[in-house]
Image (spheres, grey):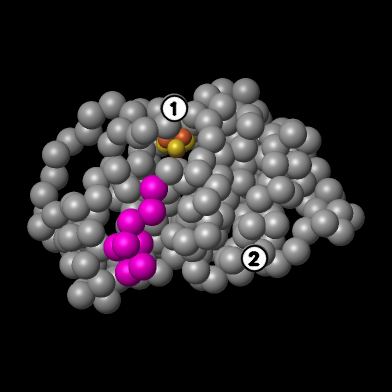
Amino acid sequence: MFTSIQGEGTNAGTVQFFIRAATCDMQCKICDSKYSWSKGERISIQQLLDDVSTSGITNVCLTGGEIAQFKGKLAALVAFLRVRDIHIVLQTNGLHYHIDFDLIHTVGMDMKTPSTGEKSNESLILKLRSKDEVKTLIHDMVDYEYAVKINKIVRGVGCKQILQPLNLVGEDTIGDLLDKYRWICEMVVKDRRWGGDVRVIPQLHVFLWGNKRGV
Ligand code: SF4
């Protein structure tokens, strides 16, 4: 758990209380939180709720690892957070969709691009609502073209699509990330194939604090 500014997606810039679940059922080559792959610390739902309450923060981001693996516990946590009038964002890897996602204010679903070395389930996009978002990480032209392909499904659903420069941890400098961000922006501006609500948004927290853990 930690408190920071949300660095990704349409909620970027808001102060959030992050709950990061341990373990993931993907193994992305580019994962920027590999420390979350190992077994974490066991903590009760009551303790999580107490910590959220003590923080005084009314925005919670449920992330991982892959938090949607914990279906039953996630449903209970989400229900209790809603009772407390907490705004909930959930970040998931595109392999899961549960009925309790309907109680979440914004579901941010990754559709893994070729550079990640993994593949999400594209049919899950069809379950999203207009307030949800699909995130595609872009490193090169192959990723870009995949994101364009996904855009056809996304705009049919009416949710948002976030194009985010892929951060190669340990390789990319802030300058490299800015170059990648600029390149994606320039491509999108001149490419008439895009439709619907598409936004090019970098990871703000990386620009501010680098790849530091817990920010
Ligand atoms: S889905 Fe997310 S947490 Fe899991 S390996 Fe990929 S980047 Fe890492």
Q: How far apart are marks 2 and 1 (CA)?
A: 29 Å
Residue annotated with mark 2: 156
The magenta-colored residue range is 96-103
Which type of secondary structure does the marked residue at label 2 adopt? helix
The one nearer the camera, 62 or 5, is 62
* Quadrant of image for the C terminus: top left
Mark 1 crowd level (few <14, some 14–19, many ≥20, 10 Å Cα): some
Q: Mark 1 CB in 8 Å range of ligand 1?
A: yes
Q: Which residue is drawn at 86% across and 54% down?
A: 191
Left or right, 164 with respect to 60, comes to: right
The one nearer the camera, 63 or 3, is 63
Q: Position of residue 126 (x, y in %)?
A: 52, 60
The three-letter code of the residue at mark 1 reads Gln
Q: Is the residue 67 above or below the residue 15 in the image? A: above
Q: Main secondary structure of the magenta part?
A: helix
**Labelled disc at residue 27:** 1
Left or right, 183 with respect to 5, comes to: right
Which type of secondary structure does the marked residue at label 1 adopt? loop
Q: Which residue is drawn at 29% across and 43% down?
A: 69
- Circles 2 and 1: CB distance less than 8 Å? no
The residue at the far front in this view is 123
**Labelled disc at residue 47:** none
Q: Position of residue 188 (x, y in %)?
A: 80, 53
Q: Residue at x 36, y 33 (%)?
A: 25
Residue 129 visible in image: yes
Q: Is the residue 185 above or below the residue 195 in the image? A: above
User: Which quarter of the frame holds ligand 1?
Assistant: top left
Counting residues from the start of the chain, the first of labels 2 and 1 encountered is 1
Q: Position of residue 29 (x, y in %)?
A: 52, 24
Q: Is the residue 71 above or below the residue 42 in the image? A: below
Residue 199 visible in image: no
Mark 2 crowd level (few <14, some 14–19, many ≥20, 10 Å Cα): few
